[in-house]
Amino acid sequence: QKECVMESEFIDYEDQGVELEGYFVRPDKEEERPLVLVSHDWTGRRQYAINKANEIAALGYAAFALDMYGKGVFGKDGDADFNSQLMAPFASDRALLRTRIGSAFSAATSLSGVDPKRVGAIGYCFGGMCVLELARGGIDVRGVISVHGIFSPGEVPNEPISSKILCLHGHDDPMVPPEQVLAFEQEMNEAGADWQMHVYGGTAHAFTNPDANNPDFGTVYSERANTRANRSVANFFSEVFDG
């Protein structure tokens, strides 16, 4: 099987006067493809998010690595305080978060080569929080995947949730204790959502990131969990787009 040639470009878009820069990649084919929004971790839309978008494109979808922070605004490896400051305005103001990711949805669905009726989203860590807010905000996405994401809701009430929801979670993630998992499951049940929670034993936060190696902070890469997660991601998007 010969490797498909990917077409990629950076896309400028904006939200309420804030300039943003997404990364768009799609298989080199003319037909309209389902679109997957890729939401970055708390360090911004850096190489890790671009790599994940490329992985999604390799599954045969168009992928848009969105930007929550602003063009050229990036966090720093190992600087939790700085990264927390970047993330905090969105974690504390979910209306702002929903508007910002909604602008990415609008920008990406207007691009050529995407099927705006078949949209999904995947997010990592902070990005998991973001794609769950996409679902909570009632935006027309078929399915969202939170990968080692934050489950706790904000103050903004939920709209009716139509998205299917998949959460891939490490049981030993210190940032998401079991009571937060249980509260999220109860929230989704009350919303009547179609949700799944895959919990990996012996697995910490950021388990899909090969650069994560800080047991004291609770971020540790797991090849085993990452392999399982990739399989689940492929299965889920196949279900929501083709089912």
Image (cartoon, rainbow, N blue to C red):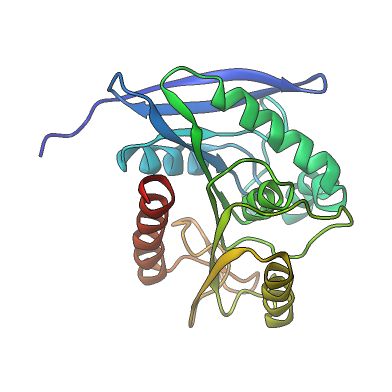
Instruction: Residue at 73%, 81% (x, y): give it.
Output: 179
Which of the two residues, 119 or 7, is positioned nearer the viewer here?
119
x, y percent for residue 183: 74, 76
| 55 is higher (above) or lower (below) than 115 | below
Would you identify the image quadrant in which residue 22 lies? top right
Tell me the quadrant of the picture where the N terminus can be found.
Answer: top left
| 58 is higher (above) or lower (below) than 42 | above
Looking at this rendering, what residue extends furthest in the left direction? 1
Instruction: Residue at 72%, 64% (x, y): give it.
Output: 191
Instruction: Residue at 30%, 18% (x, y): give it.
Output: 30
- As drawn, is 10 to the left or to the right of 79? left
Which of the two residues, 177 or 236, is positioned nearer the viewer here?
236
x, y percent for residue 45: 59, 37
Which of the two residues, 115 or 133, is positioned nearer the viewer here?
115
Would you identify the image quadrant in which residue 43 lies? top right
How many numbered circles are shown? 0
Instruction: Residue at 32%, 23% (x, y): give it.
Output: 31
x, y percent for residue 68: 70, 36
Which of the two residues, 191 or 110, is positioned nearer the viewer here?
191
x, y percent for residue 66: 59, 34
Would you identify the image quadrant in which residue 27 lies? top left
| 117 is higher (above) or lower (below) than 214 | above
